[in-house]
Amino acid sequence: MAAQILDGKTMSESLRKEITERVQALKKNRGIIPGLAVILVGNDPASEIYVRNKGNGCREVGMYSETVTLPADTVQEKLESEIDRLNADPKVHGILVQLPLPGHLDEAAALARILPEKDVDGFHLLNAGKLMTGAKGVIPCTPRGAMYMIRQTGIDLTGKHAVVIGRSNIVGKPMALLLLQENCTVTVCHSRTIGLAEFTRKADILVAAVGKAGFVTEDMVKPGAIVIDVGINRVDGKVMGDVDFERVREAASWITPVPGGVGKMTITMLLFNTLEAAERMET
Ligand code: NDP
């Protein structure tokens, strides 16, 4: 039997309804309008689309949104002075620097400049450290969205074997830590892993965050597994995931589609992180 679909669009719609209600309550009870500022350096077309979608997401749920667009030759000092300005702006509860930055800029230094409490991407070292130690902090949006989808299966995750393919700081590593928090036994695979399929075939939960279209094939998947496809790959103008969806869905019990899966949840979780940052603000 084909796998059940974990539909990011439907989940996202119901979460955005909840966010809208909480935004309205925050306005009414405390006079706070949650605000998100996005800094875009240069004019990478994909980044421009992501930034536009983030602004639209904010408006949809009644949040304040601001986009700071800087030219591609912006120097580090200027970027950091913009971050400082937004750090000090009471209308802004969340700051996001759209990555990747042009090569001459120091990404780590820029992320470190954002106040941890306004770091709604969860990339600041303090938030990364909190996730690592299990303290309450900001969780990166994509893994948070993927984890939400896994929970929607209703399956008890305790003791399940989770395999994450990918070890980036923004997806693979935080994903592995979240699964560990859920009491999964976690294996992290990467480009140097020897015998990858031997690991993936043992996975009750398989998360693919590789960046290669159709990378995960049916023979790599344990029958009945939950398969979460984080990949976003553009092939001949079409968006494709890291999983060979049509074939893998025959083996899996639950699967996320691309498009309409994890990608849909990422901006929704960004809105959630911004809302929570505003809710935490002392008045
Ligand atoms: P990175 O390129 O930073 O990381 C890719 C990871 O895949 C690396 O750890 C790499 O290993 C591993 N990898 C590459 N080739 C292989 C291989 N042959 N076998 C096993 N592992 C391999 O990408 P990101 O983590 O940033 O993103 C991953 C994917 O998720 C991309 O398609 C990206 O577009 C997508 N994405 C989607 C988002 C969403 O909203 N849905 C948000 C963010 C990303 P190594 O470390 O050894 O190089």
Image (cartoon, rainbow, N blue to C red):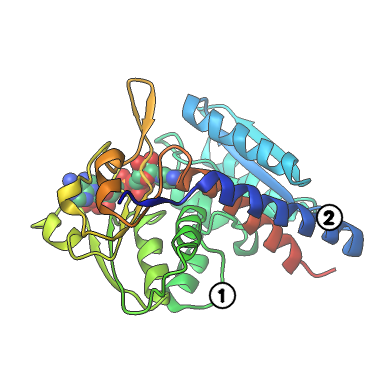
Q: Is residue 277 above or below residue 69?
A: below
Residue placed at 65% from the left, 52% from the top? 14
Q: Name the residue beneath numbered marker 1.
A: 136
Vertical arrangement, residue 208 with respect to residue 117, above or below? above
Q: Is residue 43 above or below residue 142?
A: above
| SS type, badge 1 | loop
Spatial distance from mark 1 to mark 2, Cα to Cα? 25 Å
Q: Residue at x 52, y 28 (%)?
A: 42
Under 8 Å from ligand 1: the CB of mark 1? no
**Circles 1 and 2: CB distance less than 8 Å?**
no
- Along the viewing direction, whichever of 96 and 19 lies nearer the viewer: 19
Give the residue at x 47% y 68%: 154
- Foreground: 146 or 137? 146
Q: Residues within 10 Å of mark 2 (few under 14, many from 20)?
A: some
**Which label sits on residue 161?**
none
Q: Residue furthest left?
A: 195
Residue at image point 35% right, 66% down: 176
Q: Nearer the viewer, residue 234 or 11?
A: 11
The single residue placed furthest to the top in the displayed view is 236
Residue on which the image places disc 2 = 24
Residue 86 appears left or right of 53: right
Q: Nearer the viewer, residue 26 or 161?
A: 161
Q: Amino acid at mark 2?
A: Gln
Q: Amino acid at mark 1?
A: Lys
Secondary element at tag 2:
helix
Q: How far across and down, in percent of the image, does residue 274 sit?
A: 67, 55
**Relative image position of residue 210 (x, y in whole percent):** 28, 46
